[in-house]
């Protein structure tokens, strides 16, 4: 039997709706969590409209999200974030950003950049039920 992490039945992706931003001297990340999940991702001012995301796990009041941007077959940007929430909104959003280059068939790569990040959250008004 395979053990699976506990999943909170109270989880609702609507909790994540809002704008997220991180800013340092060498890195800026901005995205919106909207109707289609991660939208309008910008890294250092450059737009990545084809960003993909996965909810890797839901553990009570925490959600692990991986955002991926494949620039080329050998270049990948990854943002892994752990969202701590109170069932209404995110409280703390922290994780890391990695820019991987020269990805080889054996899975090895050159780490062009790797930085811890703590995102700032701003909510957006909830959409009325239709």
Image: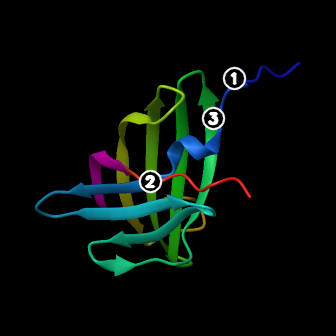
Say the numbered circle drawn on residue 5.
1
Cβ atoms at labels 3 and 1 below 8 Å apart: yes
Q: Quadrant of the N terminus?
A: top right
Kindly tell me whether residue 24 is visible in this rendering: yes
Q: Nearer the viewer, residue 76 or 41?
A: 41
Say the numbered circle drawn on residue 18.
2
61 w.r.t. 17: above or below: above
Q: CA distance from mark 3 to mark 1?
A: 7 Å
Q: SS of the residue at dot 1?
A: loop
Figure quadrant of residue 22: bottom left
By secondary structure, the bulk of the magenta-drawn segment is best described as strand
- The reply, left or right, for residue 32 in relation to residue 119 is right
Residue 107: x %, y % from top left: 56, 59
Residue 18: x %, y % from top left: 44, 53
Q: Quadrant of the C terminus?
A: bottom right
Segment colored magenta = 110-122
Is 113 covered by the magenta stretch?
yes
Residue hosting label 3: 57
Kindly tell me whether residue 109 is visible in this rendering: no
Residue 101: x %, y % from top left: 40, 70
Residue 46: x %, y % from top left: 34, 80
Q: CA distance from mark 1 to mark 2?
A: 26 Å
Say the numbered circle drawn on residue 53.
none
Q: SS of the residue at dot 2?
A: strand
Measuring 51% from the left and 69% from the top, which residue is drawn there? 69
């Amino acid at each position: 039997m395979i053990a699976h992490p506990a999943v909170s039945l109270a989880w609702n992706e609507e909790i994540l709706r809002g704008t997220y931003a991180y800013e340092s001297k060498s890195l800026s990340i901005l995205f919106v969590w909207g109707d289609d999940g991660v939208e309008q991702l910008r890294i250092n001012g450059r737009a990545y409209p084809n960003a993909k995301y996965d909810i890797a796990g839901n553990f009570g009041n925490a959600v692990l999200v991986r955002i991926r941007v494949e620039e080329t077959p050998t270049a990948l940007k990854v943002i892994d974030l752990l969202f701590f929430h109170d069932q209404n909104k995110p409280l703390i959003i922290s994780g890391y950003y990695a820019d991987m280059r020269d990805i080889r068939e054996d899975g090895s790569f050159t780490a062009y950049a790797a930085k811890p990040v703590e995102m700032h959250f701003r909510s957006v008004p909830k959409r009325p039920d239709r």
